[in-house]
Image (cartoon, rainbow, N blue to C red):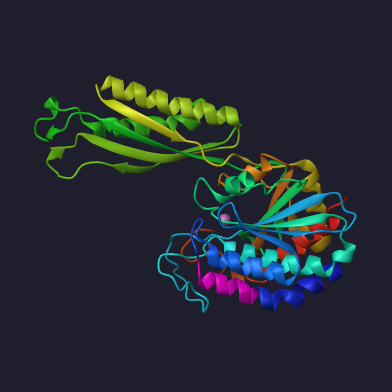
């Protein structure tokens, strides 16, 4: 089967590169992915797959029905770009200032179109129904996954799989793990209000900058002193805004940041301790505060039977030496988590880096790119998952 799969992937490769480059040149953000969704819908329609559009606002869902099949597995691609200026000089560079596909979702969309073509062609070998999910808004919260779930995208689906191109692994490699793979990604925002005044009369003020810096320093102890050393967490304060003049103590400051965790109890502990610290420190200085905590995507969790399907498919395709398993969890977030919270799921990294070609920049880097031959391996894996679906 491996030979047939790769032969099919090579046959469609040039077309898929063209589609990927077209999407790359015309990036769309968040839910505003009409053009990209149109490309996906047209491609599925051409194959005679039944297509629904407008799922989760602008998502596209295609069902490849196999007669006699009772099981349905879903393959998901995300379609949105990032609000970043691309700094590459590739011929297919983004044509839109301030928007670019710097997380590879252009490739995800193109690859899933390729997989739909291949699985349609190999339909007589399929034992399960396949649902192709093209999702908007992975990069912003609340994202496209909850919106699509709300619109029933997981109805009658038994398992779901997602892939992500990943330049830290080389083309021809796959990487995944069982259990938590990507973090819950939350954000917080704090306002500290003191009493502003003349910088030369600090004793007549309550200086929110001093309160804020003490909070930032104290927050560094949460991971080191409140979280079990064998658990994982990130607390990063990423915003600190306050003050307009060099000789004025401002009345208030605002701080913001992110919390990443792989476990609900750890997440609760971090959240509680953040608020304890700001409450105590503000109180000690006679300042007041507001604390807003926004829970983001949950943990992306890989379920064992789905992991087995992925790992055995991957080993059959590239040999076990090229399957990096299990990888340690990554503290990035991914809204594929929302699917994995509902049904058995597995998320996989597809190696897209190539040191010799200088393709080494991580996702979200302004010079991020993929080695496009990685799309052969992305298509090969999802095709194989579909074919193995009724294990
Ligand atoms: Ni991404």
Q: How far across and how far down the image is residue 220, in percent?
A: 42, 33
Give the answer, above or below, for where 169 lies relative to 190: below
Q: Would you say the magenta stretch is mainly helix, strand or loop?
A: helix
Q: Is residue 329 visible?
A: no
Front residue of 185 and 225:
185
- Residue range of the region highlighted in magenta in the rendering: 17-27
Instruction: Identify the residue at image location x=38%, y=40%.
Output: 256
Residue 275 horizontal/vertical position (percent)? 41, 26
Q: Nearer the viewer, residue 120 or 222?
A: 120
On the picture, is 259 further left or further right than 387? left
Q: Percent x, y for residue 102?
A: 51, 63
Query: Residue at position x 85%, y 70% from top?
Result: 4
Q: Is residue 312 magenta?
A: no
Q: Nearer the viewer, residue 47 or 96?
A: 47
Which image quadrant: the N terminus? bottom right
Query: Which of the 4 quarters of the picture holds residue 382?
Result: bottom right
Residue drawn at x 88%, y 56% is 127
Q: Is residue 193 visible?
A: yes
| Residue 26 counted in the magenta span | yes
The count of marks equals 0
Q: Quarter for ligand 1? A: bottom right
**Relative horizontal placement of residue 304, taking residue 354 as reference (left or right):** right
Q: Residue 313 at x, y = what percent? A: 81, 56
Closer to the camera in the image, 140 or 147: 147
């Amino acid at each position: 089967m491996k030979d047939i799969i790769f032969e099919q992937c090579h046959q469609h490769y040039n077309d898929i590169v063209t589609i990927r480059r077209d999407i790359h040149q015309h990036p769309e953000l968040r839910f505003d992915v009409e053009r990209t969704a149109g490309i996906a819908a047209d491609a599925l329609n051409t194959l005679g797959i039944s297509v629904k559009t407008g799922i989760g606002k602008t998502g596209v869902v295609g069902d490849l029905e196999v007669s006699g099949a009772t099981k349905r597995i879903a393959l998901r691609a995300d379609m949105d770009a990032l609000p970043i200026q691309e700094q590459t000089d590739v011929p297919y560079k983004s044509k839109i200032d301030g928007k670019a596909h710097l997380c590879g979702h252009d490739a995800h969309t193109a690859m899933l179109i390729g997989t739909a073509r291949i699985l349609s062609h190999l339909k007589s070998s399929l034992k399960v129904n396949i649902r192709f999910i093209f999702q908007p808004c992975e990069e912003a919260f609340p994202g496209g996954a909850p919106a699509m779930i709300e619109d029933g995208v997981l109805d009658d689906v038994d398992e779901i799989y997602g892939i992500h191109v990943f330049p830290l692994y080389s083309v021809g490699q796959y990487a995944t793990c069982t259990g938590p793979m990507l973090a819950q990604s939350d954000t917080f925002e704090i306002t500290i209000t003191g009493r502003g005044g003349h910088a030369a009369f600090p004793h007549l003020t309550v200086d929110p900058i001093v309160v804020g810096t003490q909070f930032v320093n104290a927050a560094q102890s949460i991971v080191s002193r409140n979280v079990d050393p064998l658990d994982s967490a990130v607390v990063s304060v990423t915003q600190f805004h306050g003050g307009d003049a060099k000789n004025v103590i401002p009345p208030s400051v605002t701080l913001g940041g992110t919390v990443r965790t792989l476990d609900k109890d750890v997440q609760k502990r971090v959240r509680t301790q953040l608020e304890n610290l700001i409450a105590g420190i503000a109180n000690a200085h006679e300042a007041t505060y507001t604390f807003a905590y926004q829970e983001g995507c949950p943990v992306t969790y890989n379920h064992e039977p789905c992991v087995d399907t992925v790992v055995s498919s991957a080993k059959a395709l590239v040999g076990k030496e090229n399957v990096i398993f299990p990888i340690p969890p990554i503290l990035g977030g991914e809204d594929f988590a929302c699917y994995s919270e509902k049904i058995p799921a597995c998320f996989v990294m597809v190696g897209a880096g190539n040191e010799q070609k200088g393709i080494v920049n991580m996702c979200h880097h302004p010079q991020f790119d993929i080695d496009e031959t990685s799309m052969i391996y992305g298509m090969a894996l999802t095709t194989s998952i579909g074919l193995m679906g009724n294990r």
